[in-house]
Amino acid sequence: MASARHIADKAQWRHEAAIGPHAFPIAPEPGFLPPLTCSHCRHLLHFEAQACHACGHSAGFDPAAGAFRHFEAESGAWLDARGDRQALRQCDNARYGVCNWLVAAAEAPVQCTACRHNRMIPDLSVTGVLSRWKRIEEAKRRVVHGLIRLGLSIDEGPHIWFDLLYDPSAEMGHAPRLLTGHASGVVTINLIEADDAARERIRRAMGEPYRTLVGHFRHEIGHYFWHRLVEFSPDLLPFRNLFGDERANYAAALQAHYAHSTVAGWEENFVSSYATVHPWEDFAETFAHYLHIVDTLATIGQFGTRLDPPPGATVATSATVDFDPYDSDTATLVARWIPFAFALNAINRSMGQPDLYPFRLTPTIVLKLDFVGRLLAFAAGRWAPSEREGADLKAMIATLGLGVDLDH
């Protein structure tokens, strides 16, 4: 990824950044998350749970611990699995029923790290808005939690804001006037995206194989991290060598993309058709897919799921997640992800559902994923050049000999 001189320049730039207003967070101690359970009765809970239906206790998620706490009405306290009192309180948005995260009781912000970055929320007086806002917040928390596990904070560095907006035109079935996107640190999400039927119509009209709220957040936050980690860093030239020159006219590139069909064979070099638009979009799409892979593998690992090696495999590998995906190299992630993604696609098809992961991972795409992975690892303080030499080549090789691929 870099020469010795490049590494030295990067280290100096990181040192200067650390003492300035855009200091980067220090990564937490590595460790793999166990399954999410009620801290009172150990019943399994989904990430979005606000109560345990097995024991009846209110449940709140502590993002700092990566675990649920339960509320004891008698003492008026949040308790952990040992029954110890925790100095926590609910995020202020719990009063609307849209957030299940807890914050430190002594913390000045009354909202959790995911909610406090909302600059605008939709008009809650409109019928049906509250339930869709809840779905948007659930997706945002899932993405923010993944960033926390990667050692990345949105509370530090250049600020990021979220505008979650109601669009009357889109609600009436007309063309949206408020576009989901990112500009100057502000991520805009059109509330219509939380309407399954409307989002599916948009997906089909755009010719996309995948369109979700989680995907929107991962993509748009990818733009934010490009500005934060690449734009003014020594990684800009390596980025251009791999993704292309971002100085190309974006508006013209976007217009050309929608005016003409995508160049044949794009699947070999880009993770999605939209990634072909411009280097910025290629990076954001690759960033989103890196988070897709890491977070999904973490969930697979939480449940101890494993696969036997495919019969046609020529490399000794077992698809099991017995490692921390948030602290792993790209070669390990890809070698596990491809067999699991194939199996998950097969499971979806058995239920008459579209593929969970309708994408290919070629060596070129994996090389881009490795760029993103090492970029984030370095920013979080988890990367040392001597430990990652040749990681890009290992990542590309990891796609070979698995006895399975993601061709559709």
Image (spheres, helix red, strand yellow):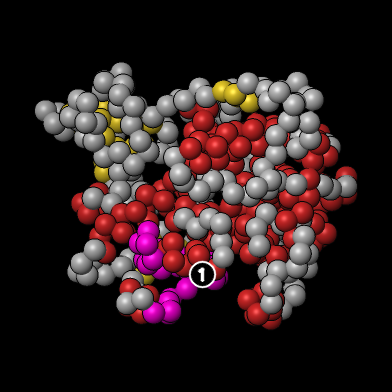
Q: What is the x, y in percent for residue 401?
A: 78, 31
Which residue is farthest left? 74
Q: Which residue is drawn at 20% across and 51% down?
A: 95
Which quadrant of the figure has residue 55?
top left
What's the magenta region? 174-198
* Crowd rating for badge 1 (residues with CA inside 10 Å; few <14, some 14–19, many 20+): few
Q: Foreground: 331 or 384?
A: 331
Q: Where is residue 167 in the image (x, y as percent from the top left)?
A: 35, 75
Secondary-structure class at tag 1:
helix
Q: Which residue is drawn at 84% across and 48% down?
A: 2
Tag 1: amino acid:
Ala
Asked if the magenta segment contains residue 330, the reply would be no
Left or right placement of residue 132 versus residue 265 in this view: left
Residue 378 visible within the image: no
Residue 391 falls left or right of residue 72? right
Query: Where is 300 relative to 189, above or below?
Result: above
Task: Please tell me which residue lies in front, 407 or 326.
Answer: 407
